[in-house]
Image: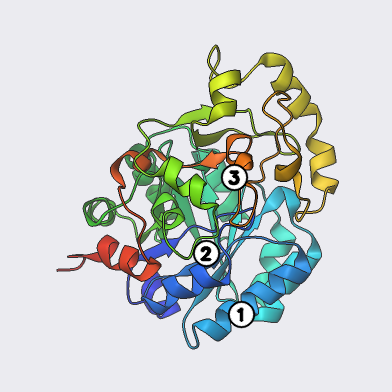
Amino acid sequence: MSLLERLGLELPIVQAGLGGGLSGAELAAAVSRAGGLGTVGIFSPVRFVAELRRARALSPGRPLAANLLMPFVRPAHVAALISAEVDVAIFFYGFNRAAVERLHAAGVLVLHQVGNEAQARRALADGADGLIAQGLQAGGHLLAELDTFAFLPRACALAEGKPVLAAGGIHDAQGVRRALAAGAAGVLCGTRFLLTEECAAHPLYKQRVLGAERTIETLLFSFGWYARHRVAPNASTDRWCAARAAGPRAVALMNRLSGPLGRRMPLSLPAARLQLRSLPLYSPAPALAGMPDRVVDVTPLYAGESARAIHEILPAAEAVAELSRGVGS
């Protein structure tokens, strides 16, 4: 049975679970209603349950996924997925075999996003039902070491028949068809769904990403989560990443040391509102709708390289339709 058949999907399109509040119930439900697989990004456990149940209510009878950022996952997050009866859990940036087993016992399918062969082997050994092969073109946090279409066949070979989704740089139907022809069971798209009406990103964040001429791989926005990430430029990257894309070495060291603190901070901490351009103490929290405009210059504008090719903000259903045009024909 294929991944689409198992989940009852009409289309091989999966919306990435954009974290930090970017992908809530409205976005996930809109994608699922359109025939793809919508994903609610991680929140605090109580908010997570609420968003997942609201997504269910907005897309009755449709499959639903939830994204687990493993550095911040607690048993209550896993319980939230089980309580809301989600169909798919997507693991990212870490491993937890016990959580996989707990989700399997509840009938939840587990996909694990990986960026190299060692991670793929570990995810499969932990019992993942499938892989998401992330390439360097992806926006947000990066595990990738290779181009999407260089890593995809390696991941497929390791998966030995289990489904593999391609992630990174895919923004249109041509990219989807290429991924499917290369052996992918489907695609995971982030930037295309960031630039939708239902995404909760600040409107100026979307405008900065829309058609951005370049993206930057950096460590600047890593206080509490020291990890590579790809962003569109803003005033903070202009100031602090001009000499070194990763950011000043002292800032990188401080961010590396902050890791244990970040794992103890609540996901709902309103860090973005407190940040200053003059003080490079930047958390991974993005700018959301309703925040002051100034935060767009002191927060990460997560975006993949496909931003250069996207020129309009669409309803999520239209984005799904564009991605799937001609697929299977």
Q: Position of residue 249 (x, y in %)?
A: 68, 15
In the displayed structure, 117 sits above or below 32; it is: above
Q: Position of residue 142 (x, y in %)?
A: 54, 38
Q: CA distance from mark 3 to mark 1?
A: 28 Å
Q: Nearer the viewer, mark 3 or mark 2?
A: 3
Question: Closer to the N terminus: mark 2 or mark 1?
Answer: 1
SS label for mark 1: helix
Q: CA distance from mark 3 to mark 2?
A: 42 Å
SS label for mark 3: helix
* Residue 118 appears in the figure: yes
In the displayed structure, 308 sits above or below 85; it is: above
Amino acid found under the numbered disc labelled 1: Arg
Question: Closer to the N terminus: mark 3 or mark 2?
Answer: 2
According to the image, label 1 marks what residue? 54
Q: Residue at x 52, y 31 (%)?
A: 234
Q: Nearer the viewer, mark 2 or mark 1?
A: 1
Amino acid found under the numbered disc labelled 3: Asp
Q: Position of residue 209 (x, y in %)?
A: 43, 42
Question: Is residue 170 toward the left or the right of residue 142 in the image?
Answer: left
Amino acid found under the numbered disc labelled 2: Asp
According to the image, label 3 marks what residue? 293
Q: CA distance from mark 2 to mark 1?
A: 26 Å
Question: Is residue 69 toward the left or the right of residue 98 in the image?
Answer: left
- Near mark 3 (Cα within 10 A), the count class, few <14, some 14-19 or many ≥20, is some
In the displayed structure, 226 sits above or below 110; it is: above
Question: Closer to the N terminus: mark 3 or mark 1?
Answer: 1
Asked if labels 1 and 2 touch by Cβ distance under 8 angstroms, the answer is no
- Near mark 1 (Cα within 10 A), the count class, few <14, some 14-19 or many ≥20, is some
According to the image, label 2 marks what residue? 129
